[in-house]
């Protein structure tokens, strides 16, 4: 048995050509088949920072997520969720307010969305790759805004995704054989998403239509290390 650890960086190029470091991540492929993802995301303006740690089972079922949000140098709060059976146990702490708890339905094939760009590659994990038709995806988000600048118990969002097949893709981190998807989101965007390998590592996303059309997110660096496990 071993523990595989992937670390990397995702950059963004905006429609006007502005390019910057967008997200840093650590992904661990755990000995029991589960996966843990830690991301730190900084908006291009530099005024929004998200710190997220999430864990999924070997079959991609969400287990738990913790997310912290900072906006304009101020701490906005923490959301922690745990999925037990068919329920999400959601806890929200915001400055100056007591902790708020809700128990929320957790249907099958649902993901927990906390807005890391890396996680967009994981949202496709329940799709039937034998089909080239659009298929529904379901996410329970932590924020009702596209860029995640608010934080709370959120709501369920649906989208339609089509698997486009496999292709070789060159990104700054290297050249990889990837799976490609077209995602029609509930925010009125058309997104093209590429992922790589059994751990569904984010490779690239292009905003093809909608707000910020022309934005490109790409994997800039990737390192892998395997640690022996007794």
Image (cartoon, grey):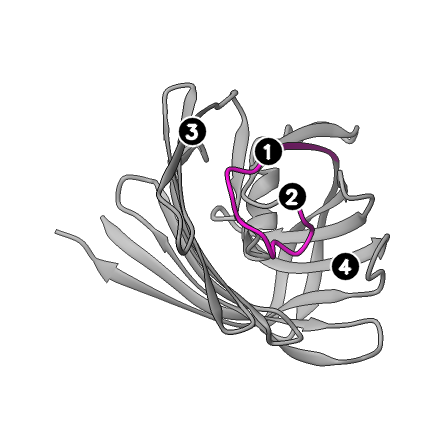
- Coordinates of residue 157 in the picture (x, y in percent): 66, 33
Among the two numbered marks 4 and 1 on one chain, the one whose residue lies closer to the N terminus: 1
Q: In the rendered structure, are the residues bearing label 1 and label 2 in contact, judged by CB atoms less than 8 Å apart?
A: yes
Judging depth in this view, the residue of 159 and 132 nearest the camera is 159
Q: In the rendered structure, are the residues bearing label 2 and label 4 in contact, judged by CB atoms less than 8 Å apart?
A: no
- Coordinates of residue 23 in the picture (x, y in percent): 54, 68
Residue 108 seen in render: yes
Residue holding disc 1: 155
Q: Overall secondary structure of the magenta stretch?
A: loop
Judging depth in this view, the residue of 48 and 211 nearest the camera is 48
- Coordinates of residue 111 in the picture (x, y in percent): 53, 35
Q: Is residue 98 left or right of residue 149?
A: left
Residue holding disc 3: 102
Residue holding disc 4: 206
Region of the chain picked out in magenta, as a range: 144-160
Give the image quarter of residue 118.
Answer: bottom right
Give the image quarter of residue 91.
Answer: top left
Q: What residue do we see at 81% from left, 79% from top?
A: 17
Q: Is residue 152 magenta?
A: yes
Among the two numbered marks 3 and 4 on one chain, the one whose residue lies closer to the N terminus: 3
Among the two numbered marks 3 and 1 on one chain, the one whose residue lies closer to the N terminus: 3
Label 2 to label 3: alpha-carbon separation: 17 Å
Work out whether 182 lies above or below 52.
above
Label 4 to label 1: alpha-carbon separation: 25 Å
Label 3 to label 1: alpha-carbon separation: 12 Å
Q: Is residue 33 magenta?
A: no
Label 2 to label 4: alpha-carbon separation: 21 Å
Q: In the rendered structure, are the residues bearing label 3 and label 1 in contact, judged by CB atoms less than 8 Å apart?
A: no
Q: Estimate how packed mark 1 is, as few (under 14), some (14 to 19) or many (20 or more) residues with alpha carbons within 10 Å.
A: few
Residue holding disc 2: 144
């Amino acid at each position: 048995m071993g523990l595989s650890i992937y670390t990397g960086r995702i950059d963004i190029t905006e429609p006007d050509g502005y390019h910057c470091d967008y997200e840093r991540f650590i992904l661990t492929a755990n000995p029991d088949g589960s996966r843990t993802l830690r991301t730190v995301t900084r908006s291009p303006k530099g005024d929004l920072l998200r710190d997220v740690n999430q864990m999924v089972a070997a079959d991609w079922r969400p287990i738990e997520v913790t997310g912290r949000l900072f906006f304009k140098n101020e701490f906005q709060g923490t959301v922690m969720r745990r999925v037990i059976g068919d329920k999400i146990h959601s806890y929200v702490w915001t400055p100056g307010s007591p902790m708020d708890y809700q128990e929320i339905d957790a249907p099958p094939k649902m993901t927990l969305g906390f807005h890391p760009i890396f996680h967009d590659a994981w949202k496709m994990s329940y799709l039937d790759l034998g089909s080239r038709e659009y298929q529904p995806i379901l996410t329970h988000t932590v924020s009702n805004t596209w860029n995640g600048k608010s934080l709370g118990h959120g709501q369920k969002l649906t989208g339609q995704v089509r698997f486009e097949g496999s292709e070789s893709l060159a990104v700054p981190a290297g050249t990889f054989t990837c799976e490609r998807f077209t995602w029609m989101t509930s925010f009125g965007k058309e997104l093209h998403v590429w992922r790589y390998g059994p751990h569904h590592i984010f490779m690239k996303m292009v905003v093809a239509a909608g707000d910020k059309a022309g934005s490109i997110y790409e994997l800039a660096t990737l390192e892998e290390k395997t640690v022996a496990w007794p």
